[in-house]
Image: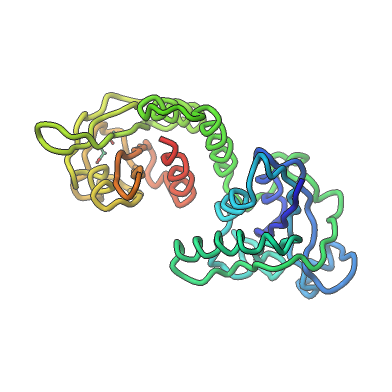
Amino acid sequence: MKEIYFAGGCFWGVQHFFSGVEGVSETLCGYANGNIESPSYEQVYTDTTGFAETVKVTYNPERISLEALTDLFFCIIDPLSLNKQGHDEGTRYRTGVYYTDAAESSVLEAVFAREAARAGAPLAVELEPLRNFYRAEERHQDYLVANPGGYCHLPLKTFVYLKAWQDIRNLLGDEPDSVARMAEIVSLLQERLRFFWVGFYRVLGGDRGEELVLGPFAGPAACIRIGYGRGVCGTAWKEGRTIVVPDVEEFPGHIACSALSKSEIVVPVIKEGCVTAVLDIDSKDISYFDEVDSLWLQKIAAFS
Ligand code: SME
């Protein structure tokens, strides 16, 4: 077993998240890298002790790598926000990764470099050796298990997406057929997240050149072919980026397959630099999709 320490804002939500990660055997809420011995929550709360609310994550490196764990950590923080995550503010809510094995710093530095490149700005996340760690009071351990519906700075769908992502990965294994993979992804997303419409369009060649052609989907009947640069799907294909449309009526050229669809997200599937398909999801509600959907759906679409 190995251990790594993640400070990601309020430790209740961070612990709940990592306790759901396969390969993690134990999680513990505590206070890390501060200046006094055995601090109480009340002392840490004053924001004068230097401690960060931190979760010790014990994991089996044969089941999950440090890199994969740190990738997941970056899924639940705003890495550009200094001393503030969600509504929680103060140095005790700063973000950081603290390690006990110096040999691991290069793996972590590589993840940090990739995240900084993606964010396009310097990260506000510490990367340091662990100096000290004190276990938090019992009432803070597994708080969200003891208090379902209790305060959590992470949106609840984060936990649904984590489970869906892991289940899809396990379900697909090394199945080589991409249509079969897409069909399973659609089914599982539909089961867990109850979208109005969810499906893939594949980039296929034919007499008319390359087009997006309808693939596995769940929901009402939809248009079968979409041209390059047409609609939201064709735009996501052309631009090679995820497009979140809060109000479909505001998107020029939007293709309305159903009058009931009000907002939409389209995630391109990119293989070796080329868009090979898009994952399209529609909602009957305005402004249904946000950054959290975008992040997890990109991870999930990559399995197709
Ligand atoms: N609205 C999409 C077309 C596909 S349906 O939403 C299923 C678009 O504008 O590309």
Question: Where on the picture, by quarter, is residue 118?
Answer: bottom left
Report x, y in % for residue 227.
Answer: 17, 40
| Quadrant location, the C terminus | top left
User: Camera-side residue: 46 or 296?
Assistant: 296
**Is 59 above or below relative to 128?**
above
Residue located at (37% from left, 36% from top):
284
**Is 241 above or below relative to 108?**
above
| Quadrant location, the N terminus | top right
Residue located at (23% from left, 44% from top):
234
Question: Where on the picture, by quarter, is residue 129?
Answer: bottom right
User: Camera-side residue: 275 or 265?
Assistant: 275
Report x, y in % for residue 136.
Answer: 83, 56
Q: Quadrant of ligand 1?
A: top left
Residue situated furthest front in the rendering: 103
User: Camera-side residue: 212 or 289?
Assistant: 212
Report x, y in % for residue 131.
Answer: 79, 68
Residue located at (76% from left, 65% from top):
130
Report x, y in % for residue 106.
Answer: 61, 63
Residue situated furthest left in the rendering: 207
Q: Does residue 290 appear left or right of residue 17 in this picture?
A: left
Q: Name the image colouring.
A: rainbow
